[in-house]
Amino acid sequence: MTDRGLYIGLMSGTSMDALDAVLVRFDDSRPVLTSTYSCPIPDGLRHRLSDVCHSRRDHLDECARLDSDFGRFEAMVVETLLKNSNTGAENVQAIGSHGQTVRHVPDGDPPYSIQVGDPALLAVMTGIDVVADFRRQDIAAGGQGAPLVPAFHAAFWRKPCEDRVLLNLGGISNITILPGNPNQPVTGLDCGPANALLDAWIRKNLGLDLDEDGKWAANGRIVERLLEHMLSDPYFARPLPKSTGTEYFNLNWLMTQLEASASTDAHPADIQATLCALTVESVTRAIQLFAPDTRNVYVCGGGALNGHLIEALRVRMDPIKLEATSVLGLDPQWVEATAFAWLARENLHGRPGNLPSVTGAQQALVLGGLYRGRIKSTKT
């Protein structure tokens, strides 16, 4: 099929801070960004999303409303992206929309993962074909439905004779392991909490949305008994494949850890420092266990902007070299949105988007459902 080359990727992660949008062209098998836009999720919408995500009450009606409201928000972001880049909707092949995850339970009975952001509404409002609901197909084949970005990492950044790890520091930290030996499979996993707990704790104590550059954590001292108790959580010892989310690692989990480790009287800044150390330690241990020959780690995601966290990782990982994905040609902020643009492209071409060696699925599959935003012209 003819590929006109322009795709839009939309990504909103577990931290629920913003919706990232990219307009990207895949020239010569390389992603080339032509425009980017990041829009903070409005407070009211974010609070409603968080309430549905963390509550165990029946929220069917609210989920339906959020599905529509987030879809309209996505359409507004796409409209702004196109306007800023002076690009007509007719020039875009498809939108790859991750949606906003409100529940991820890959080990449930039955397993499931739910994202809101009505793709049919998004397609109608933008007039652009939309590929969405990427996780369901992998879960149907026995996989975790996550992480999905490793296939994108492998397509562009795997290098012969060099063992690499791609580290994404989003709400949850995850790694993609890219062996230099072509006979070894790509693997990956969710390591544990990252920005989700750091953001939630500073929001609870200081009313701020994030710990800018990790300055608050840098002023605290690590509470060793709390750190060790958190690291004893069974998730960290689970074998592959594994994925997680804020359904598990949230403020309720943290409060339980504080009580069980007799750390409820610790200074809030010390707890923030300890949460930062938890991310550092869980990521480093995962790399040591599953990718012991790694010499280069490339970091992306919002956590790549947290100077304190990055420096702590660099010290802990030494002699492994830690660099931002910008040295590979893609700004750390836009990697995941670009990945979902690529996944939309793979869907249109009928190519698999998951890696069974990462998710545990029984087979490689074309991911996502296609929602038509325009009528295709036919010539006789």
Image: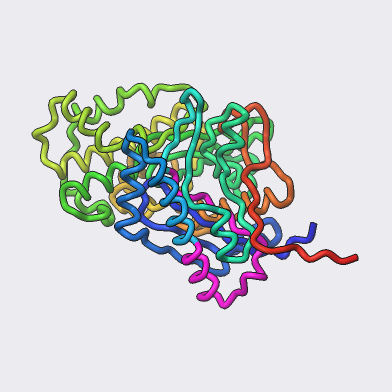
Residue 18, how many percent across, how many down? Answer: 39, 57
Residue 229 included in the magenta stretch of the image: no
375 horizontally vs 232: left or right: right
Residue beneath the point at 38% across and 25% down: 235
Q: Which residues are magenta?
A: 75-101
Return the residue found at the far right.
380
- Spot occupied by residue 22 in the image (x, y as percentages of width and height): 53, 62
The one nearer the camera, 265 or 53, is 53
Q: Quadrant of residue 58?
A: top left
Which residue is rendered at x = 56% and y = 45% of the image? Answer: 133
Residue 23: x percent and y percent?
57, 65
Residue 49 in view: yes
Q: Nearer the viewer, residue 287 or 72?
A: 72
Q: Which residue is at a point 29% across and 42% down the rendered structure image?
A: 197
Q: Is residue 27 left or right of residue 223?
A: right
The quarter of the image holding the C terminus is bottom right
Residue 331: x and y in percent read: 48, 59
Residue occupying image coordinates x 67% and y 37%:
365
Q: Is residue 13 left or right of residue 340?
A: left
Q: Can the viewer see residue 169 in this picture?
A: no
**Residue 284: which quarter of the image?**
top left
Q: Quadrant of the N terminus?
A: bottom right
Residue farthest bottom in this picture: 86
Q: Is residue 85 magenta?
A: yes
Residue extending farthest to the left is 265
